Image (tube, coloured by chain):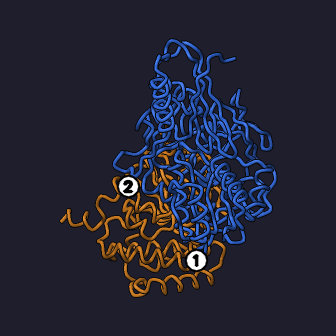
Amino acid sequence: MLRIQNLTCYYGRIRAIKGVSLSVAKGRIITLIGANGAGKSTILSAICGILGNWEGEITFEGSSLKALDPPSVVKLGISLVPEGRLVFPPLSVMDNLKLGAYTLYRKNNSTAAAETLEQVMDLFPILRQRANQPAGTLSGGEQQMLAIGRALMARPRLLLLDEPSMGLAPQIVEKILQTIEFLRDNGYTILLVEQNARAALEIADRGYVFETGSVVLQGEASSLLEDQDVKRAFLGKDYGDFYEDRQ
Amino acid sequence: MKTANNVGSMTADEKNQLQLERLQSSINRAYRNVPFHRQRFAAAGTEPSHIQSIPDIARLPFMKRKHLSEHYPYDLFAVPLRDIVRIHTAPGTTRNPTVSGYTQQDLHVWQQILARGLHAAGVTPHDILQINLSPGLANWGRDYKRGAELTEASVIPNIPLSIEKKVMLLRDYKTSVLVTTPAMAMELALYIKQQGINTNALELARLILAGDLVTPDNRRFLEETLNVTTWLHYGLSEVPGPAIAFECSQHQGLHINEDHFLAEIVDPDKGTPLPDGEPGELVLTTLTTRAFPLIRFRTGDRASIYTQACGCGSSLRRIQWFAERTDEIMNIDGVNVHGQLVLSNIEETIGRLSGPVYFFVQQVGAKKYLEVWLPVSADIFSDEIKELEKLIHYAENKLRENLGVPVDIRLREKIE
C-alpha cells in the first residue's frame, strides 16, 4: 500500500534520513521504533508532504507522493495524528472533528462529513459526550482520542500516528493501543511511530528499527520483541517502569 | 508483506522491495558493527546509503574464504558474543578453522529454511526421516535435524553407522525419507544391489541429496535401484549452512531462498556481474543473518540463474548448479577441502619436505577420499619401516581429523 525506497531527508545540511526503504501492507500495523532523533517522525513528515525537501521514492497505492503538499496527500487517503496531539484547545470537540473533514467540506460533501462524524463518535463515545466542551478541557487520553478522531474525519485508508502514547499514564496508553488495534481490525492501515517500543511491538504486525537515520533491523514484531539488540536498546524499561521512576 | 511460508507467492515487485529492505538493513548492521566491513567499504569508496537498488550491490567488495580465516575467531561477528548461542567450526583455508556464530534468531531462521526445503520435497508429519551425513558435515546434521523436527516428521538424527547398520535402520525403523550425500547414497544403493535386498521391503520413498552435485546418470541409478524420488539441496559446508537452494516438485534447478539470500552470478576471473542464464561463480549475500553476515561471499561454486519462471509457480529464482568449481577447493562428499590446508597439515605432522606434495580426490566405488602423495626423501626416510608407517598413519589421522574427510597417504619415490 505504502512503499518507500531510498528516502533521504535533510534538515539544512544535516542528512537526517539516509536512504531508508520500507513498506506498509494493507490492513496491518507497521511500527517504526528507535531512539529520540533516529529519524522516525521525519519519515512521517516526508510522507505527509510537510517536509518537502526529500529524495528517493514514496508511493501510495502505486502513485508517487513526490512534490505533493499536505492537503493533496490527505486527499489521496493519508492522515497524520501529530505528535503532542495538537488539538485546538479553545474550539469545541465537535469543531475540532469537523476541521478534520476539511477536504470533504471543500468538495461540498457535507453528507459524507456528517456520516463520518457519526462513525467517529460511535468509535469514541467519549467524544460524543464531550462534543460541546472546549478541547483544551479534555484529559490527555481524551485529547489523543480526539486527535485520532479528527484524522479519521478525512476518511483515510492509511493512518500515520506519531507518538500517540507520549505523556500518557500507562492505563491510558493501554486504551490508546487497544484503539489502534481496533482500527486495524476495522480495515485501517496504520504506520505507528513510537518511542515506547515494547507497547508498539506488542500490537504491531511488523516493525522497523531505526538508528541515526538508517534502518538496522526489520521483521515480524514478535521476533523483534525477542531480539537481544532490540531488548538492550529499547526494551530495558517498559513504560510501567518508566512511569514508576518518575513518581 | 508475506510471511516466511508463502514467500514463493510474492510478485517479483514485492520480492524486490523485501530484498532491498533487508539488504539495506543488513548492510547497515554489518557496517556499524564489523570493522572489517567498514574498512573495506571505505577502501572501495562506498558507504551503505549508496546501495539504492539490488544491482547496486556490485559496488561492494567481495568476501572470500581467506577473509574468514584471517579474522579468526570472532572478528567477523556482528553481534556481541553474549547474543551468540551456537558456534560452528569448519575447516578453513589455513591452519585456522572457519568459525561462524548464530544467534537464537539465526537458528530459528535456519530451522525455517530447512523446513521449507523439506516441505518442498514433500516431507510431512507422517514421514520417518533419517539423516546420514559424513563427519565433516556434522553441522549440517544438526541443521537438518532441527528443520525436520519443524516439519513434525519423526527424525533419526545423524550418527556414524556402518552400511549394514544403516540398512538395518532403514528397514526396521521404516525410514521414508533419507537425507544424505550423493556419494553415500550411491554406496548404499550399490550395497543394496549387491546384497540383493528387496527394496519393496523398505518404506524409503525420498532421498534428499545434500553436499554435492549428483550426475544425471547416478541420479537415475539411485531412483531405479532404491525405487525413490530424489531431491537435491545446495548449501555451503563452512558458512552459513545447508539448503540455501532446494529443488521443488519440478526437479528443474534449485530455488534459492531469496528472502534470506541474495544470489549473484559473477565472472570468476573479472568479478563482474553476469546476466541471468550465463554460467559463472555463485556469490551470496545474507539478508537476515544477525551474527555472521556475508556480503558478496564468493562460493567457488559454478552456477547460472534460470531466466524462466518455474512450473511450480514460485517466484523464488532458480539456479542450475554445475559440477566444476571456480576455485581450487575440492568437494569430498560435501566437505570443502582447501589445498593450502592439506599442505599446512602435512608440514605440521611430517615437517617440511624437499619434494612436491600432490593431492587429489580419489574414488573407489561410490566413496570419495583425499589421496596424498608424499615424495620419499631424506626428510622422512627412516631405516625402520615401522617408524615410517607410524608417521604416515599419524599424518593420515591428523588430516582426517582436521579436514573431516577420509585420507590415504602414499609414498612415491618418483612422482612424474
Res. A63 in view: no
Q: Report x, y in % for residue B2.
A: 61, 65
Chain where mark 2 sits = A
Q: Report x, y in % for residue A172.
A: 33, 75
User: Taking B290 as reference, is A55 left or right?
Assistant: right
Of the residues shown, which amino acid type is indicated by label 2?
Gln
Badge 2 element: helix
Which is more toward the observer, A79 or B221? B221
Which is more toward the observer, A156 or B35? B35
Q: Residue furthest left?
A: A247
Q: Is residue B217 above or below residue B403?
A: below
| Discs 2 and 1 lie in a common subunit | yes
User: Taking A241 as reference, is A45 left or right?
Assistant: right
In percent of the image, x 65 and y 40: which residue is there?
Answer: B283
- What residue is pinned by disc 2? A228
Q: Is residue B174 above or below residue B288?
A: below
- What residue is pinned by disc 1? A187
Chain in blue, by letter, is B
Q: Residues within 10 Å of mark 2 (few under 14, many from 20)?
A: many
User: Taking B135 as reference, is B121 left or right?
Assistant: right
**Rendered shade, chain A:** orange
